[in-house]
Amino acid sequence: MSATFSYRAGELHAEDLPLGALAERYGTPLYVYSRSALQERYDAFDRALGVYPHRVCYAVKANGNLAVLGTLAARGAGFDIVSAGELARVLRAGGEPKGIVFSGVGKSSSELGSALDAGIGCFNVESVAELEALDALARARGRRAPVAIRVNPDVDPRTHPYVSTGLARHKFGIAVADVERAYARAAAMRGIEIAGLACHIGSQIVALDAFEAAASAISGLIRQLETQGHALEHLDLGGGLGLGYGRFTAPAVEEYAKALLAPLAGFRQRLLIEPGRAIVGPAGVLLCRVLYLKESAEKRFAIVDAGMNDLLRPALYDAWQDIVTVREHRQADAHLYDVVGPVCESADFLGLERELRLAPGDLLAVRDAGAYGFSMSSQYNGRPRPAEVMVSGADVRLVRARESVEDLMHGEALFA
């Protein structure tokens, strides 16, 4: 967890503010983000790439809160989007259109049109069918769409299968064997302007050799494409750097940058990277409150007011995230607890067999919850989504209001 979340006088703080006070003011469950942690993590990626021509394009899917996006836009970030909704968010937050890359296998005609009209920097095209659709839309507008074809390098990132995207069996990208034909097809299209080459092998990756293997594969393709007369302005190597989540030490950003840059020595293309989790994950925590302690013949349960609808990662990926008490030294016996929520699913847990000292009413913080927390939340079981706040020093802002029960029924109607 970022050093901006630290204990002071026995209580966990976000920068200069005690989390207990934030819970009292805004209620729980509550997502709390540190603005300085967000800035520091972005700067770490930007600094690690050094003098190599580059741009850090934050992956909006990790956390699309406007305050998060606005903080990064002010830092000079580009943005990796996967929908028209994310495009609208980036533009609302002050993101530069030319700094936006649009990824994803299923961009609709409406979404492609919106991005063309906004004048984004590049479309990461993932199929010949998409290329043809984009060409037609661009020609109808009297424009040329800048594209990078996303190649699937068949590299195993050794991560969870649900977030592995670079193997031949996955839906993403175009196979290496088909890339040359795809570029030849793009070069013949009047509505397409070839801008670069793209690749993304997955998420939560901690094996640096996988990044290096992908970069090596892409460097070979660049040489092949250039010999065929395709001028590539940039190379997009995606994101995917993982976090340790309190269980192990993840690779440093500097080591990640070295793994990418080593195979690119001598190349002139601008490098784009698309980190999401590794920027915003350590910048957030999820606060929740213990409702009840329950003991069975086999288990002890800490039943909290946050569930899988608030933080889906443990249920969906069997993910492990560190859970700590907001007050550091409670006078209670330590026990192994399953920290579970109120949702009617056996998969509704935040953490299993965690050694904690607890009493009803205690506050818990789920660490490194800034990424894929609120962005994957839902209203399942009729539960309003939590509030989000951002802290900067001793200042705090409500950056998303807590939903109400009325919000759950917005837009619905009885069949009468």
Image: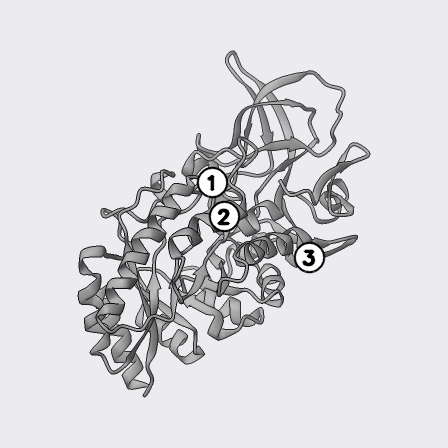
Q: Position of residue 305 (x, y in %)?
A: 60, 37
Q: Amino acid at mark 3?
A: Leu
Which residue is rendered at x = 48% and y = 43% of the image? 242
Quadrant where the N terminus sits is top right
The residue most toward the right is 9
Q: State the count of labels.
A: 3
Q: For marks 1 and 3, give the one nearer the viewer.
A: 1
Question: How many C-alpha atoms fall within 10 Å of the one at disc 1: few (<14), some, or many (≥20)?
Answer: many
Q: Position of residue 129 (x, y in %)?
A: 21, 67
- Please give the label number shown on residue 11: none
Q: Is residue 106 left or right of residue 382?
A: left
The residue most toward the front is 266
Q: Quadrant of residue 342?
A: top right
Q: For marks 2 and 3, give the one nearer the viewer.
A: 2
Q: Amino acid at mark 2?
A: Tyr
Which residue is rendered at x = 62% and y = 43% of the image? 285
Q: Which residue is mark 2?
A: 372
Which residue is rendered at x = 48% and y = 47% of the image? 256
**How much space separates mark 2 and mark 3, taking CA atoms?**
19 Å
User: For the residue labelled by badge 2, is the local secondary structure a helix, a strand or a loop?
Assistant: loop
Q: Which residue is mark 1?
A: 313
Q: Are marks 1 and 2 in contact (CB under 8 Å)?
A: yes
Q: Amino acid at mark 1?
A: Arg
The residue most toward the bottom is 142
Residue 50 position (above or below residue 211)? below
User: For the residue labelled by badge 1, is the local secondary structure a helix, a strand or a loop?
Assistant: helix
